[in-house]
Image: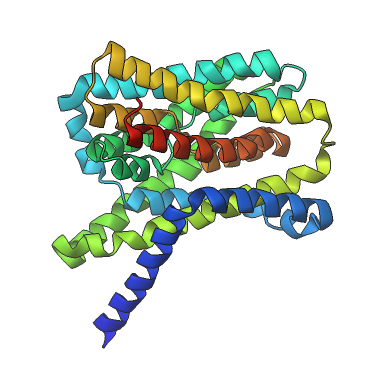
Amino acid sequence: MVQLKILENLSIIVRIDNFIRNYYSYLIISTVTLGIIVGKTNPSITRGLTPYMLYFIAIMIWTMSVTIRFSDLSLAFKRGRLIICGLFTNFIFLPILCYVLAISIMSRYPIYATGFILMGTVPCAGMNVVWTGLLKGDVALALLLGALTMILGIVTIPFLTGILAGVYASVDILGMLNILVMVLIGPITLGIITRNILEKRSGLKVGKYLPAFPPIAAITAMILMFIMVAVNIPTISLSGDILVVLLAPPLILFPVAFGGIHLLCNKILKCARKQTIAIVYSSGMKHLPLAMGVAFVSLGQQAALPIAVAAIFQTLNAGLFYKIFQKGSM
């Protein structure tokens, strides 16, 4: 009876997971819209949640880490060219692209520029594996890049942000590093331990428990996004100038990032289609909930606003390129 109950609960969780995957773009837009409404009408509701931001981030990273097999990191040495390409586009191409857009469009709003630059330095999005799988890309490569960028992000986020955004704001690199140790190293370690416990107890059947974790990560990410928007909305005047500053950079960023990475992988490096898809989605999509949390805690709440806005464009862009790849136009 107990086992039957567990299977029924897992079935419900799988349905929730499928619902989130199928309607993720709509859920993101709805979350941001709800954040705007609550922020305008009753912002005090979310202020009480802000002290728990780091805990939400830690829960999100933990649940994501359980689904990643860090033991597969040794495979990186066997796929050197592809891994180097993925790390280059993640930690050099995207940060520089964000920097160029920030100094070109956001220079009059230093705190927004700093947050936008930080966004380019974070690891790839957890949804990279989902999009890669839907397009029948190299899922193993996407998983490998996800694990590597998550680990390297502990160092790349504070140092790249300090180098690129230092002209706009005083970036406390050591302070940011301490925050990342708290929200990345601890939860990742706990995720590895959790997976090992599940594998020891269930053996080869561990796969049936893993679908329980992505929905928790997705829901936590949406809670973070809601808080960011609701807290920031009362502090800004939505003039035409502000709208251009917040909307134009992500509108340009993601199509250029996807197109540029595809050009590098497919045309210059002559990667196979499966590998190209994996690298495009593992580099062109960033872990924006993590970026929002780090920006909020280390730079101030306004630095997180452009990242929350970018989340809408990132999701819509991923869907657009999904259709383009499906049709074989690229």
- Relative depth, front residue between 306 and 110: 306
Q: Residue at x 31, y 32 (%)?
A: 278
Q: Position of residue 264 (x, y in %)?
A: 34, 15
Rendered view: 72 above or below 162:
below
Q: Residue visible at 30% across and 54% down?
A: 193
Residue 99 location (% of width, % of height):
58, 17
* Residue at screen point 41% across, 24% down: 90
Q: Position of residue 4 (x, y in %)?
A: 26, 82
In the displayed orientation, state which residue is furthest to the bottom: 1
Residue 128 lies in what quarter of the image? top left
Q: Residue furthest top?
A: 268
Q: Is residue 53 visible?
A: no
Quadrant in the picture for the N terminus: bottom left
Q: Which quadrant would residue 63 be assigned to in this image?
A: bottom left
Q: Position of residue 238 (x, y in %)?
A: 82, 36
Q: Is residue 47 shown to the viewer in this render?
A: yes
Seen from the viewer's position, the closer of residues 30 and 1 is 30
